Amino acid sequence: MEFILAKYNYWIYIFLMMVGFYAAIAKKNLVKKVIGLNIFQTAVFLFYISISKVQGGTAPIHMHGNPVYDNPLPHVLILTAIVVAVSTTAVALAIIILINKAFGTVEEDEIMDILELND
Amino acid sequence: MFKDLPILIIVIPLLCAVITPLVGRINRVFSWYLVVIATALCFLGSLSLMSAVLQTGTISYWLGGWEPPWGIEYVIDYLNGFVLCLVAFMAFVVAVYARKSVESEVDEARLPVFYAVYLLFVTGLMGIVITGDIFNLYVFLEIASLAGYALIAIARRREALIASFSYLVMGTIGATFILLGIGHLYMVTGTLNMADLGARLPELYGSKVVQTAFAFFATGLSIKIALFPLHNWLPNSYTYAPSAVSAIMAATATKVGAYALIRVMFTVFHADFIVSGIQLNEMFLFLAAVAILAGSILAVAQTDIKKMLAYSSIGQIGYIVLGISLLNLTGIQGSLLHILNHALMKGTLFLVAGAIVYRLGITTIDDFKGLGKKMPVSMAAFTVGALSMIGVPLTVGFVSKWYLAIASLEAGMWFLIPVLLLSSLLTAVYFWRVIDNIYFQPHEVGKISHGPELVHEDARPQDAPALMLWPIIVTAVLCVVFGIFTSLPLSIAEKASMILLR
């Protein structure tokens, strides 16, 4: 029990990751898929932030004395990954706008119906 | 100047990508000139890097002068020097080809943007290949992927949007898996430099974290290279993308993914970890064999030329993974050769498919009747590419299939030989349908069922314009040249595989 509670941030990360993964794959609405992807990616950010935590560490800012710092490198990596995630979302939403213009819907099954009618 | 060449071949296309839409405002043709110049410079840069590697061995470049493993390091050795040349060469060839092809398949107002995204795509691919830092690899992977989604979505047909979106969802899941793998490795080693990881990991091979990391890498990269059960995004993407994009993606994107897989399996991890630590080589072997057969069988069932080539790509990815997962010298050598060979032959085939689309606007194989008379040079190139795919001696396809077959025997996996033979047979079947139509079926005037109104009712030869024809000829000729004079790629592949299995 203590093991589970002490690592609660990892449990949250796994839960969020599964929620996002499920939404990205199973949802039929394209916007919901993108939301799922976002949750999925955010969960990974949480994972990175969790591994950077040092027990009793503070923010990695230079101060007097010699306090224990958290590892700042994963923070920096995650800043980059956030930029990547934002760009992905932007591209995805741009494609969804074009899909909506071309098909008049953002529901996957309706789009498939339209495509089959054309064939 | 030469000292900074490793970074220049990344920075040049990146900066040009920014300038391209701006010069495109003055005159749309300028943006094309810029792309051709930038990719040509990349190609020359890669060649001189490769020749430097051949003379002096591995080159290491420290970004900003920061010493690795703290700073980002660009490493060029036999393996990635070779892939770098291949990517830059195909990028240049397709850039030359793109002008006519893309003009006819993409809205005119979007052309400068198309070229900008094309350069970003090339930047991403070159970056994946040249970097020695695993997080840097992830960033470049995402640059290439995001540019790739845009390149597919830019096509006129609305199916392209759906294809692009499903590629985006799959690709992002794959990339996030890779990010997770990197996180797990960083957690236990505290380093991101690939060589440094390779040195620190062996003592941790028993750790569950390291095994999880490898599982994430394997899954994520399998999505990126479209290994069989994870291939769903590929056929539609290649089919509906503009022809030039299909050509560059088929020739380089999955190859670079395969390169990344090789790097992760053999530089970051070691061959013995994959055998004894996690026992994934048998699973890869099985998936590769299934991919080879399934890709070929599905290709036989297609009526659309681009879709057929796309499914055949899935089979060819199977060959590359097969060689890697045999984990012996000959196998990896075969895989590396197949990366080069498949890029050349699939590049040729997709370029010809694009030339047909440009001239006639058709992609259905049944409509190709009489094309052999109409577009003789393109069709000759197509035949060379097809023979090479089947693996006829004197073409590149034969060399790599031969090596893969030998490697299977060396590993005691004789049951792979029938798989290779059967798939060659199936390849012959699906290419024969095309060859039969273009050479041996009479041209039926006015019986073409799809495509726009045709202006080619007369049977005079009317091949693709020179700007499209020359790239086709060059890649087709290289298919034969490297099939006959095999010593250069063979020796590079041998040295590279020796480094990998050290």
Image: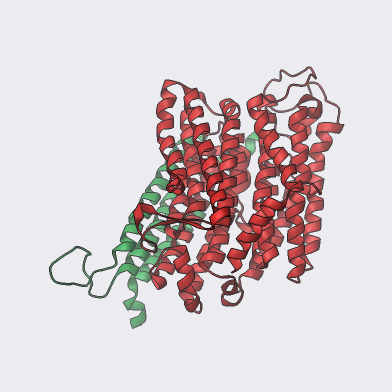
**Can you see residue B239?**
yes
Residue B250 or A2: which is nearer the viewer? B250
Tint of chain B: red
Task: Please tell me which residue is depicted at 81% across the width and 49% down the height of the picture.
Answer: B393
Q: Position of residue A32 (x, y in %)?
A: 44, 49
Task: Please tell me which residue is depicted at 51% across the width and 32% down the height of the picture.
Answer: B37
Query: Relative to B95, does residue A22 appear above or below in the rendering?
Result: below
Extreme front residue here? B55
Q: Position of residue B427 (x, y in %)?
A: 78, 48
The colour scheme of the drawn protein is by chain
Task: Please tell me which residue is depicted at 47% across the width and 49% down the height of the picture.
Answer: B127
Residue B399 or B232: which is nearer the viewer? B399
Residue B124 or A91: which is nearer the viewer? B124
Question: Which quadrant: the N terminus of chain B?
Answer: top left
Tint of chain A: green
Query: Relative to B368, does residue B428 appear above or below in the rendering?
Result: below
